[in-house]
Structure formats: C-alpha cells, structure tokens
Image: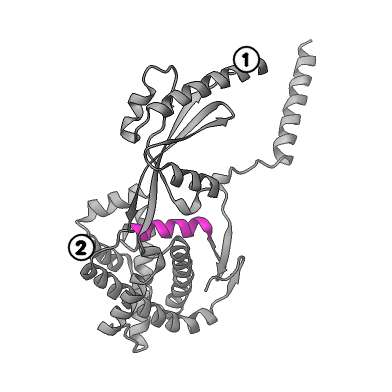
Amino acid sequence: MQALEKILRSAVLMALMLFFTTTPTPIPKAFAVKVLVVVNDQPITDFDVRQRMKLYDVLGMRGGSTALKRKRALQSLVDEAVLFAEARRRNMVPDDIQVESAIKSMANKMGGMEKLRAALRRKGLGMSHLRNYVRAQMIFRAIAARAGRKMQVKVSEAEVERRLKKILSDPRLKPITIWTLRRVELPVDDVSPVMRQQLMMARAVEAQQIMRRYKGCKSLRKAISGIFNVRVSKPLQADPRRLPPPLKKALKKAGTRRLIGPIAAPKAVQLIAFCGKRSIRPKIPEKGKLRQQLRAAIQQEKIQRQVDNFMKPLRRKAVIEWRTKKPF
C-alpha cells in the first residue's frame, strides 16, 4: 500500500512539473511592456516613456498635451541612449561625483534634497531615473561645447505678441452659454405589467400635482412636499448645443417657471426643470503671466530645434530599430 501511494505521489509530481514547464504563465496587463525602439541593442519600452513623463512632472516640465509629452519623453530616451554610446566612444562619461554635484545644485533650487527625493517617491521613481537624465544632459553639454555649439536663443516681443494673439483668437476661448437643469423622478417599483401600468398612471397624476405647484427652481422642494418617494437631482450643467432638438425646443418654450413632462422613463416618471442659463469663459492667465509663459515656451521650442539639429548626425551613427511608428 505504501509503495502504491509513493508511486501515485511521484506521478502527480511529474504531472505538475510537466504542466508548469509547458504552460506559459500569462502576464497581467498592468505589468506587460511594449518595446517601442531599440537603440544600440538597448530596448526602450512604453513603461520607460511613462517613467520619463513622471520625471518631467517632478522637474516642472508639464507644458503641452499628453501626446506631446509622450513624444518628448520618447525622443529624450532615444537621444539619451545615443549620447551614452557617443560619450563612451569619446571617453566623456561624467563620473558619479560630477552627477551627484549637479543633482545637489538642482535640488537646492527645488527646496532641498529631501524635498526632491519625496517628489520622486510620490511618482514611484528612484534616484536612478534622475541620475540617468542628468548624466545625459551633462554629456550633451560637453559634446556640444567641444563642437563649439552654444544653445542660446533670443525671443523678440513681436514673437510673443503673435503667439498671444493666436491664443486669444482661439474659438475655444470664447464664452459659451450653459443651461442649468434639474431632474425630478417619481420611481416606479418592479411590479407585474398590469400593476405597472396602473402605477405609472398614478405617478403621472402626482407629477401633474407637482407641475401645478411649481413656480420656479426655488420652489421645487415645496412643490414635491407631501408626495411619497420623489427624487430631485442636483443642478445639471448642460451645453444647449448638445441637447436633443425636441428637448431644447421644449425647454425654451417652458422657460424657468414651468416644468417639462410628465415623461415616461423605464423605471420612473420624470419631470425636467429649466433653472436658467449663464455664460462662462475658459479661464486663462492674466496677460502678463501668459506672456512670460509664452516667452519660455517659444524659447524652449527654439532650443529644442537646435538640439534636434545637433543630434541628427549623432543619431545617424547609432543603430536605431523602431518597433512602432517613428514619432519624430
């Protein structure tokens, strides 16, 4: 008997070993990564890009859309790999002491090293992410200096004014009208079809009572008093351009002193109140602050063009294999 049990245990063990060696373990989507590009045999993944975008947030480089930030982060990582290879070839890799000194100087401008470390931790980043970034920046400056290139640009007042005029003329910054609505619901419980029809009729009669009492949104609570099981929504902000035309027409006709309804919904009888309209304008910084932001943005764009022009020949010397559509 013992011999039989031993044989059975061995058989089960062999089956488990076979299963685990032949069945791939699925990787959760949260941990799956996609290689976007390989630079000199170094893969750069979508995870790397997300980490670099987080680092930019820590460093205060938050301008632009998500797509632009992603493009900037990917280009930075590609150039970083190119620069590291070039620095090793020229024996120009900054040592750890130089990198730590640069990070300390950066931290002093951000409120101290502890504050910088805490900001990195909140984003789920370690100091190694910052060290790689800083080392690459130091390599770039050293190579550019050896080539006699200075990344200096000037931004004229005319350039700032042209950009400001373009932004302020954007149709998305024009005021828009918002309508405030409230929904009144008289729920209908789950009952048989026959009882449901009777209950819907009873609720419609109660809805008519509310409509007779209603004198405007401020009177809504008083209008529903004494009626069992009534729900009133919070004020709803609606863009009239997106409302169904029949509803928009009915709201205009009813005005702010009458309710629209009763409306038969799947599980309730509804009424709609038009509480008024107001004009809102997207918030933009005051012009002085906006000019400063635009000047900095234009300056960064010009510097980026110079950096890109300087990096093009270095990229051509590197082995870059794109596994996705090249974004730049």
Q: Position of residue 167 (x, y in %)?
A: 35, 71
Whether residue 154 appears in this view of the structure is no
Which of the numbered marks, if any, corresponds to residue 62?
none
Residues in magenta, as a range: 45-57
Residue at screen point 61% across, 44% down = 27
- How far separated are the C-alphas under marks 1 and 2? 72 Å
Q: Residue at x 36, y 20 (%)?
A: 225
Give the numbered dot on residue 195: 1
Camera-nearest residue between 30 and 129: 30
Count of marks placed on residues: 2
**Is residue 50 on the magenta stretch?**
yes
Dominant SS of magenta comes to helix
| 155 to 54, vertically: above or below | below
Measured as percent of width and height from the top left, residue 310 is found at: 43, 83
| Residue 129, quarter of the rendered image | bottom left
Q: Label 2 belongs to which residue?
A: 109
Tell me the element at label 2. Answer: helix
Residue 199 image position (x, y, % from top left): 57, 17
262 inside magenta stretch = no
Placement of 56 over or under 197, stated as above or below: below
Residue at the image position 48 percent from the left and 54 percent from the top: 241
Confirm whether residue 260 shows in the render. yes
- Which badge, 1 or 2, is on the more N-terminal residue? 2
> In terms of depth relative to the viewer, which is nearer, 50 or 236?
236
